[in-house]
Amino acid sequence: PSLSRNRSRNPSRIPSRIPSRIPTSEPSVAPTAEPSRIPQIDPVTDAPSSSSPTDAKNECDALLDLLSSRSPDGGTALRNPDSIQYSSWEWMCDDPDLGRYTDATRAELYALDVFYTSAGGLDGLWVDDDGWGKYPAEDGGVDGKCLYAGVTCGRLLVEDDDGDGDAALEDVVIGLNLTRNGLGGAQLPGELAMLKNLATLALDGNSIEGSIPSEIGLLTELSNLVLNDNFLTGSIPPELSNIGSSSSSLRYLVLYENSLGGTVPPEIGDLTSLIELSLDGNALTGRLPDELGRLTDLSFLFANGNELTGTVPAALGRLTKLEVWRMDGNGLTGSLPDELFTEDIDATLVEFRADGNALTGNIPATVGLLASVLEFRLDDNVLTGPMPTEIGGMIDVLEFRVDENGLTGTIPSEVGNMMSCKVLQLDENVLTGTLPTEMGQMGNLIELRLDGDARGGGGDNTNGNGNEFTGTIPTEFGLLTDLISLNIRRSQLTGTIPTQLGELALLEILYLYENQLSGVLPTELGRLTSLTELRVGTNQLTGPIPTELGQLNALDKLYLRDNQLSGPIPTDLGDLDSVSGLYLYNNALNGPIPTQLGLLDAMEELYVDGNDLTGSMPPEICSLRDTQGGGGLLVALISDCAPSSDGTILPEVSCDSPACCNECTESDSGGGGGDITLAPQPPTTPPILAPTPAPVERPEVFSFSQGFSLGQRFSLSQGFRRGLKAKGERRALWKKRRKKKVR
């Protein structure tokens, strides 16, 4: 290779070079302890003086000896004519200014060129390769390396190799930051260790493959190692612990979203200056080593999204400076040690997540010490026992989730002290008793989930058969005026639906189905103009359908099935412009089917069977079927339009099938959900819940917090800390994630 390797400069397109989770208040390059070695960020253009050799061959041979002595492998690869290292040496030999460079500059130029070639620089894939592949004299003098895209230099005292102790100020490479720059290659070269003054190595967001070179452990001045979002494989080199021997040792070790395997090296515990350890989104196995408890300066611990097993070490309780603690999405077992939560850690911890594991035992009572935590999640484990009353001490928590466990006992009244809480999810446990009226004090709640589904659904699991709350719905729930989702389905609640729920003007989801609620549907529900889903089916509700429900202009689905509702179908339901599903089956409704329902051109499903309705199916409704040539959306229209099986009872509703009603159920003499047999449902309708032959919805239950994926770097609590306070912003955030199906 020769000067033909040089490429013309591209316009500067250097991306942001601050690692996504390294605080911007921290310098990207840590100064050394000696004032004389404080880096100067601006590149220096003064050329160091050096005599030029007269014999080019001798100069090239001397370069080979120098590079061999400084190469991590002793020059083995350098002497292989087929290697990248040999090619870089040949390229340097052709540099007419080679004799002007100091030994330090020669070594750095060689290491940079080996890296450039190894990372696909010659393939033209780099977003910004400005200066790379050029001789320094062509790009700013002998220190032109400092103008390479992504390279930062600082002026440091550098000793000569002759051993006489002489040193001179020289511009050396202290930062290599090529974030999201199109880098590739099958392996990072070990020659990076020849950049011995390197303080920041940030190569995140590229397509680098291969393993992390163990030689990086030789970079004793390294402060930031940021290699996330690549395709790295192999294990984490234990040699990285050598960086901890320096006075300016590693502070940020960021390796998330790769394919790293093996165990977490216990030697990482020697990196006692670490502020962030990010190992999430890999394939790490084994248990978390006790030695991590020595990282007493650690603020961010991300180990989520791996395949870790074993118990959580009690030694991690020594990490009293932690702000974010993520262990979710692994296979951790055993109980959480009481030592994890102390008064010391309360001063800093804002996020704790161990959800999605196989943890057992009780929730430690010491969680009550976490008065400053904003997000606390232990959902989707196998925890048992009661909820500790000490949770009332978590007065700043914004999101508290212990759903999908096997918790028993009652909800402690102390939960009402969590008045800052926005998301409270206790669903899919085995909780019993009455709902505490003190929950009405939680005026900042956006989502409240108390539903009784057992983990996995259907009750066929070791965690029990789901929550079975008794008693009435507290009228104090009407004070939760920020509430967007209220879910208390599938429990044993009795009494009436509180009229106070009509005060929840922001409510979009109301699930009260499959309880034992009685009385009439409150007319006050018609005030909930933000409501998109109202599901109160399978209760013991009586009386007429309130005409006020026709005011719910945002309503998408209305489930009133399997009750004892009577009277006619209100014509006002024809004002529900947004509704896609009306489920009125198995009640005691009578009279004709209103023609106004034919105005609902967004409707996809209409179930009116199992009632005592009469007359003909209005042609206005039939026209909503695509079979009528109108291109309508209605795919399921079910009514009592078939005679009884013995032919003694004529159809209660006259409806052509399949031109209009695609399914006809058998008519009977009593209506109101008598002994009827429903025809098989079309594939687009909700599945049938055994053993009842009637069609039962499987609702899409939306979870506010689960709208944030594991890969998103900012947690729910961090989002609220950024000032997500206005009601309009909260509603916008809720709507943004509404399309995500949770169950």
Image (cartoon, grey):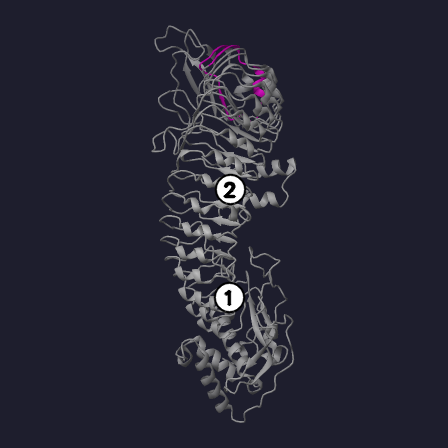
Per the image, label 1 sits on a secondary structure element best described as loop
Type of amino acid at the residue the image marks with label 1: Ser
Does any portion of residue 408 appear in the rendered image?
yes
Mark 2 vs mark 1: which is more N-terminal? 1
Element under disc 2: helix
Q: Please, is residue 564 above or below residue 346 in the view?
A: above
For the point 64% across and 43% down, which residue is it?
A: 723
Looking at the picture, tell me which residue is in the foreground, 316 or 686.
Answer: 316
Determine contact: label 2, label 1, CB under 8 Å: no
Instruction: Give the spatial CA distance, label 2 vs label 1.
Output: 33 Å
The location of residue 469, given as percent across then percent down, is 45, 24
Q: Nearer the viewer, residue 724 or 413?
A: 413
Measured as percent of width and height from the top left, residue 77 is found at: 40, 77
Q: Which residue is mark 1?
A: 249
Residue 639: within the magenta? no
Q: Nearer the viewer, residue 670 or 738?
A: 738
Classify residue 685 as left or right of residue 574.
Answer: left
Give the vertical position of 664 relative to 153 (above or below). Answer: above
Magenta span covers which residues? 587-614
Give the answer, above or below, for where 5 lies relative to 258: below
Residue drawn at point x = 44 percent, y = 81 percent:
68
Q: Quadrant of residue 154?
A: bottom right
The residue singled out by tag 2 in the image is 369
When the figure is inspected, residue 49 is found, relative to residue 523, above or below; the finding is below
Where does the image place residue 602, in percent across and percent down from the top left? Answer: 56, 27
Count residues near mark 2 (Cα–Cα under 10 Å), then give few for <14, some for 14-19, many for 20+.
many
Q: Position of residue 733 (x, y in %)?
A: 59, 39
Q: What's the residue at 36%, 23% (across, down)? A: 690
Q: Is residue 704 visible?
A: no
Nearest to the eye among marks 2 and 1: give it: 2
Give the quarter of the figure containing the C terminus.
Answer: top left
Q: Which mark is residue 28?
A: none
